Amino acid sequence: MVTPVVELRNVSKYFAKVIANKNVSFSVGEGEVVALLGENGAGKSTIMKILYGLYGADEGQILIRGEEKTIKSPKDAMTMGIAMIQQHFSLVPTHTVTENIILGNVHGKIALKKYDEKIKGLAEAYDFDIPVESKVGALAVGVQQKVEILKALYLETKILIMDEPTAVLTPQESEHLMGFIKDFAAKGNSVIFITHKLKEVMEVADRIVVMRDGVVAGNVLKNETNERELAKLMMGKELAPSEKIGVKDFSEAETLLELSRVSVVEKGETPLLEDVSFMLRAGEVFGIAGVSGNGQDAVCEVISGSRKLTSGDVLCCGQSINSYTIRERIDAGIGYVPVDRYRDGLVMDMTLAENMMLKSSFSKRWTKHGLLSRKVLNKYTSDIIRDHKVKAVGPEETAKSLSGGNQQKMVLAREIDVGQKVIIFNQPTRGLDMGAVDRIHRSIIGEKEKGKGILLISTELSEIFEMSDHIAVMYKGKIMGIFENGQLSTERIGLLMAGYTGETEASGNEK
Amino acid sequence: MLNILSRAVMMCTPLMLGAMAEVYAERTGMMITSIEGIFLMGAFGGFVGTYFTGSIVLGMLIAILCGLVTAALYGGITVYMRQQQIVTGTAINILAAGFCAFFYRVLFGIPTTPLKIATLPKIEIPLLSKIPVIGEVLFDQNILTYFVYLIIPVSYFVLFRTSLGLTLRSTGENPEAVDVAGLNVNRIRFLTVLVAGAFGGLAGSFYTLGYLGMFTSGIIGGRGWIAFAICFLGNWNPKGVVIGTLVFGLADAVSIYIQAVSGGTIFPNELIIALPYILTIILTISRRSFNVPAKLGVPYFKED
C-alpha cells in the first residue's frame, strides 16, 4: 500500500471538559481531495487546526509521509508543506497583496518590485486575476480568498486545507475554486476541504470523511455513496423534508413595508445603497440574495432605524417612518433579527430574561407599581424557552452559556414578539446546524402564515429558494432585479450576484 | 530669533525620540501609556547615574536601563497578562512618580539648593555648522540631538522597507495574520515595547542630562504625554512625527523664551507654560483622518 501523505491516528482534543475530537483517524493520499463533511460544531475545524499546529492534540499521533511528527505551530506545519486557509481570512487589509503574501517569509530589505513580479507570475500560472499592488481591504471577498490561496502556493504547499471556502463566494466563484482544487490535486498535491454542503462534496471530493459530535461517523469513497446517505451520516437521523410553498397571488395583499428609492451615501464614499425600492406585503417572504457586504446590512439598518438614509422613503403601512426613532419603529411593529447576534442581538453577560426585555424595557407589561417585576419577566421567558424548545436551564441563565442555535432561538422569539407587522431576518441561520436551521425555517413560515411581512436576507441560495415568494438580488448597494421564486435559475442568480445583468434582463419581469 | 530656533530643535529631541518609540510600539498594537513614567525614570536614572559615576555616558546607559525595566514591567503586564493598557500605564506612571520622589529623598536627603550636574556639551559639526542660519540652528547641538537626526530616517526605512517593518506593521493591523505566518505575536510586541522603553528612557534623560542639569519630580511635566499625542498626530509615521515634534518644540522653546525675557509681565506665566498642552488639545481635535492601527490597545488572545 502507498504511504499516505497525511495520516491521523486516534487524535483526541478536549476543551476544558468538552470533547472536541475523540479518536479521529483518517488519511489523505497524494493527489487526493478529501472532503471533511459535518454540521457546525462537529469538530471538523478543530481537527484541522490540530493538523495545522494551531491547537495541540491531547492524544493520538500525526504521521506525515509515514513519519510521526509533532506540529507545534503553523510554522512547523508550513515547513512540512501544510497550509490552511481559515474561514476568517488572516490578511492585513491595509497592506498590499504582495506584502500580505511575503509577510514572515522575507528577510532584511524588501525589494517590493521584484516580489510584485514574482507573485504576478505565480498568479498567472494558476489563472488567478489578482492586482498584486492593490490594498487587500479594497478587494472583493472572493479575490481575498485567492490571495490566501496564493499565500499557500507561494510557500509551495503540498497539503492544502480549506475551511468552508465557498461560504463567501458566488456560485461562479465557487465553480472557479472547484476547478482550481481539481487542477491543484491533479499536480500531485492533496486537498482537505471542510464543508457542510453536500453538493460541493459530490462535485469535488474523491473521498468523504463525515464527522459528527467530534468523531468520524463515516469514511466513504464518493463513487460509492450518495447525498442521501451522507446527510444521514451527518445528522445521525433523517430530516423530514419541508413542503415546498407555491407562489401566491399578492396583488390583493396589504403592503406592510415599502422602500422607495432609498439611497445611503456617506460623504466621499461609494454609496452603500443606491435607489433601492421594493414592497413587502402581508403574508409574503421577500428574499434578498447576494454575496455578503453588498448593502444587505444597510437595508436592515435603514428599516430598523439604526442608519439614516440620504434620500428616499421608508414606509410602514403606507406611512413614512423616516423621522421615526428606533423605539417608535419597534412600537410600529418592526422586528429585526440582526446578522451578528453576539454584537447586535444579545447581551451575552446578561440573563435570558433580561435579554428578552431589551427592546421593550420601557413597556408597562414588565412592571408592577412602577418597579420591574422579575416574576412576570421570568414567567414570560420560561414560556418562550418551553415554546421554542430552547435548551436552557431557565430564565436566569446567562445568554453566553447557550449554544449558537439556542441563542438564535431566543433572539427570534423576542423579535417575533416585537415584530407584529414586519420581521427582518438578516442571515438567520448563519453558522447553525441543520436541526436548528429547520426549526428557524418553521418559525419563519409560521409567522408568514399569520400574515406578517417577512424580509429574509441570506447568502445561502438554497435558503432563499426554499423560503421566498419573491427574490431580489443585491450587488454593490443596488437591487439587480426582483423576481418571482421559480423564475430564476441558480446560474442566472449567480451572475446577478456578481453584478452581471446579462441579456435576459427583459424577461426578468420586474415588479 | 536664531536662538529660539536652535532652542526649538533642542527641545524637539526628547519628544521626537519618545514619539518614535510610540510609533514603533503602536504599530504593533501596543500603546505605551506608561511613557510619562518611562520618561521620568529615564530622567531620574540619568541624573543619579551621572551624579554618582561622574560620567554622562554611564548616566545615559543607566537611563536606558531604567526605561527598559519600566517598559518590561508594562509589557509583561499588558502583553503576557493581557491587562488593560490604559489602566496599567496610568498605574505605572503613578508608581514612577512615587519611586523617583522617594529615592531622590533617600539618596540625597533634602538639599537646600538643587543638586547640579554638568550637562551634555554642545558639539559643533565642522563645516556644517558654518552654514549660515541652518548651521547654527541644526549643527550646534548635543549628541542626543544628532542621534535623533539619524534615528528618524533609519526608522522610516526600517518600518516601510524591511521585513521587520512589515512584521511590525502587520502585528498592529491583524495579529492573526502574523501568527498564521508563523511569527510569535506576543514576543514581537514585548520586544518592541522594550525597544520603545529604551528610547523613552534615553529621551527622559535628556531633560536632566542635556538641559537642566538637575532633577525635580515635576521635570517631565506631561511631556511624555505630548510625545504620546505626537505619535497620534503624526499618523504613526516618522515623517508626521518630525512635523508634529517641530511644532511642539517651537512652542516649548517660545514659552521658555518668553518666560525668560518677560519674567511674567507681558503674559501670565501660567498661560505660557500651558502653551504646548493647549496646542496638543487643539491639534488633536483639528486632525481630520486618522490611520489608527486596527488592533491598537487590543491584547492578542490565541485560542487554546
Image (tube, rainbow, N blue to C red):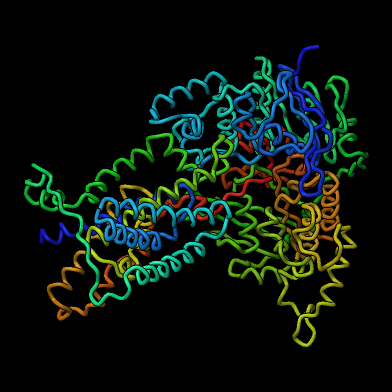
| B228 relative position to B181: left or right | left
Image quadrant in which you'd find residue B2? bottom left
Residue at image point 73% right, 63% down:
A335
| B26 relative position to A503: left or right | left
- Whether residue A313 is visible to the viewer of this picture, yes or no, is yes
Q: Is residue A489 above or below residue B88?
A: above
| B1 relative position to A218: left or right | left
- The one nearer the camera, A321 or B110, is B110
- Single out the residue that lies furthest toward the bottom: A369
Residue B289 image position (x, y, % from top left): 40, 55
Residue A179 image position (x, y, % from top left): 66, 22
Residue at image point 41% right, 47% down:
B195
- The one nearer the camera, A450 or A365, is A365
Q: Give the quadrant of the N terminus of chain A.
A: top right
Residue A407 image position (x, y, % from top left): 78, 57
| A377 relative position to B113: left or right | right
Image quadrant in which you'd find residue A373? bottom right
